[in-house]
Image: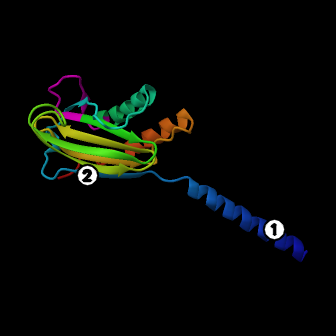
Amino acid sequence: MKLQQAYRTAVTIGVGVMLTLASSRIQAQDVKTNAMPGVDFSKFHTYKWITISGGAHPNQIVDQEIKQSVDSQLAAKGLTKTDNEKADLYVGYQTAVDQQKQWNAYGMGGGWRLGGGMATATQSTIDVGSLVLDMYDPSTKQLVWSGTATKTLDPSSKQSKNEERLNKAMEKLLKNFPPRQ
């Protein structure tokens, strides 16, 4: 009797440890956002997708999934997507499925990003499975909002799981957009 009870206790503890270890492998997505102080986000009504040169981008399928997920969140915030050069806001992203370098470039003068005029560039590291979403004011050519969602992209995972994870991450990332000043 005591042996059976000890066996049951050991099995219960073993199962509990296994469940704890398994649940610790399921990592929660982390999001971080930052906004330029003093920017009046109420002036932004339209946005246009841009490509961040030098940034890592996925294949066309994942590219469309990312854009659709962000489009859905921005539409819910009252922003309208356009292809017009006179958009109020430019939106771009870059990804990393392993640790990669991220380039942050800010320029003044002609051209977008590093083209013409004075510019500075800094480098940082993006963690595994991350998506960095940047928003620029085209009139000032300045970064006004940036957000990072980690543990969002996993090329080894099923497409349906990736899409679900991506949608949750973009909802979480853009939850407090536009920021309150």
Expressed as whole percent of the image width and height from the top left, the position of residue 67 reads 36, 31
Q: Residues under labels 2 and 1: Cα distance?
A: 51 Å
Coloring scheme of the render?
Answer: rainbow
Amino acid on which the number 2 mark rests in the picture: Asn
Q: Quadrant of residue 2?
A: bottom right
Q: Quadrant of residue 170?
A: top left
Q: Is residue 38 left or right of residue 26?
A: left
Q: Which residues are magenta?
A: 76-90
Residue of label 2: 34
Q: Residue furthest right?
A: 1
**Viewer-closest of 73 and 166:** 166
Which type of secondary structure does the marked residue at label 1 adopt?
helix
Expressed as whole percent of the image width and height from the top left, the position of residue 27 reads 51, 53
Expressed as whole percent of the image width and height from the top left, the position of residue 54 reads 30, 36
Q: Is residue 180 above or below residue 115?
A: below
Q: Main secondary structure of the magenta part?
A: loop
Which type of secondary structure does the marked residue at label 2 adopt?
strand
Q: Is residue 58 left or right of residue 71?
A: right
Q: Is residue 123 left or right of residue 68?
A: left
Quadrant location, the N terminus:
bottom right
The answer to which of marks 2 and 1 sits earlier in the sequence is 1
Are there few (<14), some (14-19), or many (20+) residues within 10 Å of tag 2?
A: few
Q: Residue at x 72, y 68 (%)?
A: 13
- Examine the structure image and report whether residue 60 is included in the region drawn in magenta: no
- Examine the structure image and report whether residue 79 is included in the region drawn in magenta: yes
Q: Is residue 98 visible?
A: yes
Q: Is residue 177 visible?
A: no
Residue of label 1: 8
Q: Residue at x 40, y 30 (%)?
A: 63
Q: Residue at x 83, y 69 (%)?
A: 7
**Viewer-closest of 119 and 138:** 119
